[in-house]
Each structure stands twice: as C-alpha cells, then as structure tokens.
Amino acid sequence: MLENMFANVNWERMWEATIETLYMTAISVLATFILGVILGLLLFLTSKGNLWENKAINTVISAFVNIFRSIPFIILIVLLIPFTKLIVGTMIGENAALPALIIGAAPFYARMVEIGLREIDKGVIEAAKSMGAKTSTIIWKVLLPESMPALVSGITVTAIALVSYTAMAGVIGAGGLGNLAYLEGFQRNRFDVTVIATVIILIIVFIIQFIGDYFTSKIDKR
C-alpha cells in the first residue's frame, strides 16, 4: 500500500537525506549557541551602564549582528561562496552549508541572548557586585543561570529556523531533505518525494519544539 502511494520515493535515499539534515542542524545549532551566547554577552556587557561599558565596541558588534541578521539566507549563501570554498574546499555537500548556517543564525540568536540578559533583575547583578564578585563570577553565577530559560527558548526558535535554512541550502547542492525535495521531487515532477521530505522536516521541527519547551519549563522557576 505504502509503496503504491509513494512509488517514486527511494526510502534509503530519504533516510540518508534525513541524516544529512540532522547533521547540518546539530552542528550549526551547537556552534550558533556558543557564538550567539558570546556575542550576546558582549552586546549586553558593553552597553550603557553595564560592566564593560564601551560604546565603540558595542557599536561594532551591534553593526555586525544587524548586518548578518538582515541578509536573506539564500543571498548569504551566495555571498559566502569564496569564504566557504576557502575553509571547506567545496560548495557541495552538507559540510559546505555549515559556514552560511552558522553565520546566518548566530547573530539572530545573539539578539535573543541580549534580550534575555536585559530581562534579568538589575538588583541581582548589583547585589553580586556589592559582594565583590568578579565579572567572570557574575557572568557564570548570575547572568547565564538567570537568563537560561530565555537562552533555551531562544535556541529552540533558532534551531527551527536552521532546519528551514538547511532546506534552502539544499536547493544549491548542500544535501539533506531540501536538496532531495528539489532535485528528486520538484525537478523530476515527483510530488510524493516532495511530500515525504516535507513531512519529515515537519516532524523534526515538532520534535525540536517539544524538547525546547520541555527544558524551558524545567529550567524556568518563575
């Protein structure tokens, strides 16, 4: 029955494409989380009235974040072709998509991190400062723990965006479900291939959202 309904679907290739999408998503989410937290902390700490107040540095980081956050992803991939070829050596395959995925998502997540940090009660930070806590201690013991629900919620939204980014990257040869849906489904007029690839992407998104909501509710003590 299943084979008749989806006669054009190569299930082995569909599984391989799913693994490629999961690989691209997992690596880029991890890198985005690390870079986004660093950039978000720098945006927050160098802003007016905070521990490392520095207008020049804050302006530079803010400009970087705003520029890369605003470029449509499909254009960003094209702009980064020379950079990708330099560090990966090719523009084809799942590894070739990683630089654009990370550079496209990290600034987006950095703003979420900054917003999460700004929501922390100033009194908690002032209390830590009055007790003589070092900046590193304030970061690790106050800022990150207090903003953790927002950080987890933010990386969940970003991870879902990255799944859609991998699909777009697939259109220009990065592999994964997007590449399969476009080459095997759209270009060869095999609607069933496109449908199955879309359903798998939706399942991945639902799983990410469920995991993110679960951990956010566990961490949030409010």
Image: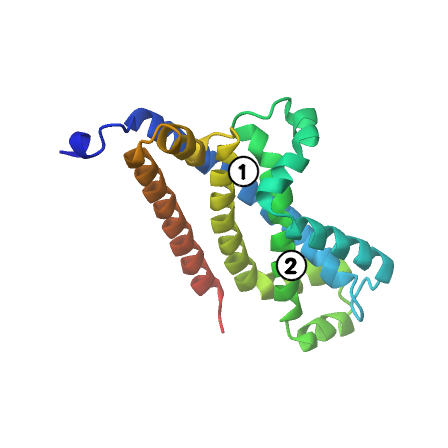
**Residue for point 33% across, 31% down:** 189
Tell which residue pokes out farthest to the top in this image: 89
**Residue for point 66% across, 25% down:** 85
Give the mark nearer the N terminus: 1 vs 2: 1
Vertical order, 100 against 128 (above or below): above
Residue pointed to by mark 1: 27
- The one nearer the camera, 156 or 136, is 156
In the rendered structure, find residue 111 and report the number of the disc placed on it: 2
Q: Residues within 10 Å of mark 1 (few under 14, many from 20)?
A: some
- The one nearer the camera, 203 or 117, is 203
Q: Quadrant of the N terminus?
A: top left
The answer to whether residue 134 shows anywhere in this view is no
**Residue for point 51% across, 28% down:** 173
Residue 181 appears left or right of 94: left
| Callout 1 secondary element | helix
**Residue for point 49% across, 34% down:** 171
| Callout 2 secondary element | helix
Place residue 214 in its image quadrant: bottom left
Of circles 1 and 2, the one toward us is: 2
For badge 1, the amino acid type reads Ile
Vertical order, 218 against 104 (above or below): below
Residue 186 appears left or right of 132: left
Tell which residue pokes out farthest to the bottom in this image: 123
The answer to whether residue 189 shows anywhere in this view is yes
Residue 194, given in percent of the width and then of the height, sits at 34, 37
Residue 62, given in percent of the width and then of the height, sits at 75, 57
- The one nearer the camera, 189 or 55, is 189
For badge 2, the amino acid type reads Arg
Vertical order, 84 against 68 (above or below): above
Image marks 1 and 2: residues in contact by CB distance under 8 Å: no
